[in-house]
Amino acid sequence: MSLLPHWSSRVFSVELDGAPIYFGVQEKFRGEEAPPPRVFRDARRDSCYSVLVCNRDRIGRAKFYAQLKDKLSRDLPPKCVLSPMSSFLPDVKDSLIRGYFLRADSECASLTERILGDLIQHDPVLVCSYLQRENGKLWTQHLWPHPGSETPREYCVVPSAEPQYHPSTLNIVNSDVFYSFEEAYEVLKKCGDIIPEATSVLELLPSRVEARSKPDFPVIVIEGLDATGKTTLTESLRDTLGAVLLQSPPQCLSPWRARFDQEPPLIRRAFYALGNYITAEQIGQEGMKTPVIVDRFWHSTAAYAIATAVSGSPCNLPAEGSELYRWPSDLLQPSLVVLLTLDPEERKRRLRDRGQGKTKEEQELDHSQHFRLRVEEAYRRIIGPSCITVDASPSADQVLQQVLRLIRGKCHL
Ligand SMILES: Nc1ncnc2c1ncn2[C@@H]1O[C@H](COP(=O)(O)OP(=O)(O)O)[C@@H](O)[C@H]1O
Ligand SMILES: Nc1ccn([C@@H]2O[C@H](COP(=O)(O)OP(=O)(O)O)[C@@H](O)[C@H]2O)c(=O)n1
């Protein structure tokens, strides 16, 4: 297996209470090993295991990773604790593999081992168990052999320094955020066999995508979290400016949206990315005749994708200026992007008053302050064009007047 030659260069990260704990492995005891990392010190008398998903094909890997949690939560004894885990080559792009770290007490260890033994027989996983030596002063990692292969490999567990780039940023390109039509198209094309709806989406796509010259009329995108007032503002702008109002994802994708919202990030994000290209095609046509207002566009696609891929505090986001925030070179660039921001309490009040159902991601915005901060910060870091922030807390009319001033200043309307 190609992962193995680099096994002792890999770093392992276990997420405990939202914070990563890093460790590495080395072939031999050197005698001066530092104390084991906290995941092992906490484990005391429990048995520890890890399961990492290693399909070669990325669609299979995305699908199986999503199923693995359900499978493990269903089959493992309730007392077995599951934590998200990953393994990566520090600061090496596309090197991240995901999985789970398991802690089982003496009562449930043998059942856990049976379930993992069955998993390794049938599914593309790497399984390790961890054993303590010298009263927990040292831990060893035992990589289970695959059916038919040689003996298990034993390594010594050692603490590892925090990498420069948070591991969850390593695989963002073309897994969470797509920087060209072709890359997103490839994913949906490959899904055709397992998701028949993907073929219907592909049929709606423009036949050719090219970064065309700007339409004659201004194109104004309104961005912001749910309930910040995008619908209210975009409708008023349409009426005031005699503009056409478009949205991303476009109306023609509505029948498929709920279906793709259930898919793992790779597939879900490719769907939204392609939606932007359909909207861009519509903008290109309408923008030759009138100004165009757009309710959400690429900023939303990229900001939510990055904020979901990265866990924990906004400090874990890719740094400002990172290439991950760049606009796709083949996607139409709007004349102005306005980001509506709102105090979290006022946003919740508006959500309650509106009283509609929310997507899972929007519910998460309410529950997790960190997630909301990550989305807002990612919005602000995107460039090419970057967004102009507008406080959406004044009355609807005041917000409209403020945005009209911006449009007149920037777009000569
Ligand atoms: N400036 C504003 N002041 C007070 N309430 C507002 C304002 N803008 C919108 N609302 C109300 O807040 C709720 C969410 O607004 P909406 O335009 O649907 O947001 P979004 O499209 O961003 O989800 C709606 O009930 C709307 O009437
Ligand atoms: N252009 C877009 C628009 C939405 N989205 C996704 O759609 C979700 C928000 O859609 P929504 O329907 O709740 O938004 P509202 O228009 O209701 O504010 C976000 O969670 C994004 O993941 C996207 O990726 N790209």
Image (cartoon, helix red, strand yellow):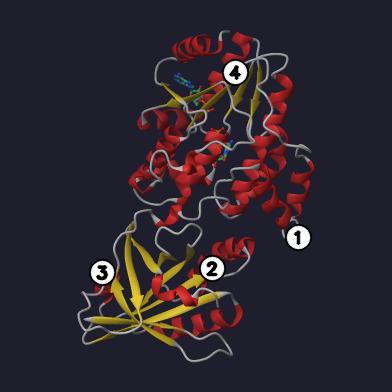
Residue type, label 1: Asp
Q: Secondary structure at mark 1?
A: loop
Q: CA distance from mark 1 to mark 3?
A: 44 Å
Residue tagged 4: 235
Q: Residues within 10 Å of mark 1 (few under 14, many from 20)?
A: few
Q: Secondary structure at mark 2?
A: helix
Residue type, label 4: Glu
- The image shows residue 120 at horizontal and vertical percentages of 55, 81
Q: Nearer the viewer, mark 2 or mark 1?
A: 1
Q: Quadrant of residue 412?
A: top right
Q: Nearer the viewer, mark 4 or mark 3?
A: 3
Residue tagged 2: 68
- Horizontal side of residue 269 vs 164, given as left or right: right
Residue tagged 3: 38
Q: Please determine whether, in this image, residue 53 is positioned above or below residue 135.
A: above
Q: Please determine whether, in this image, residue 71 is positioned above or below residue 299.
A: below
Disc on res. 193: 1
Q: CA distance from mark 4 to mark 3?
A: 53 Å
User: Is there a contact, CB below 8 Å, between mark 1 and mark 3?
Assistant: no
- Horizontal side of residue 87 vs 62, given as left or right: left
Q: Secondary structure at mark 4?
A: helix
Q: Decide which of tag 1 and tag 4 comes sooner along the chain.
A: 1
Tell me which residue sits at (76%, 54%) in the image. 196
Q: Decide which of tag 4 and tag 3 comes sooner along the chain.
A: 3
- The image shows residue 68 at horizontal and vertical percentages of 54, 68
Q: Residues within 10 Å of mark 3 (few under 14, many from 20)?
A: some
Residue type, label 3: Arg
Q: Nearer the viewer, residue 152 or 30?
A: 30
Q: CA distance from mark 2 to mark 3?
A: 25 Å
- The image shows residue 396 at horizontal and vertical percentages of 47, 15
Q: Decide which of tag 4 and tag 2 comes sooner along the chain.
A: 2
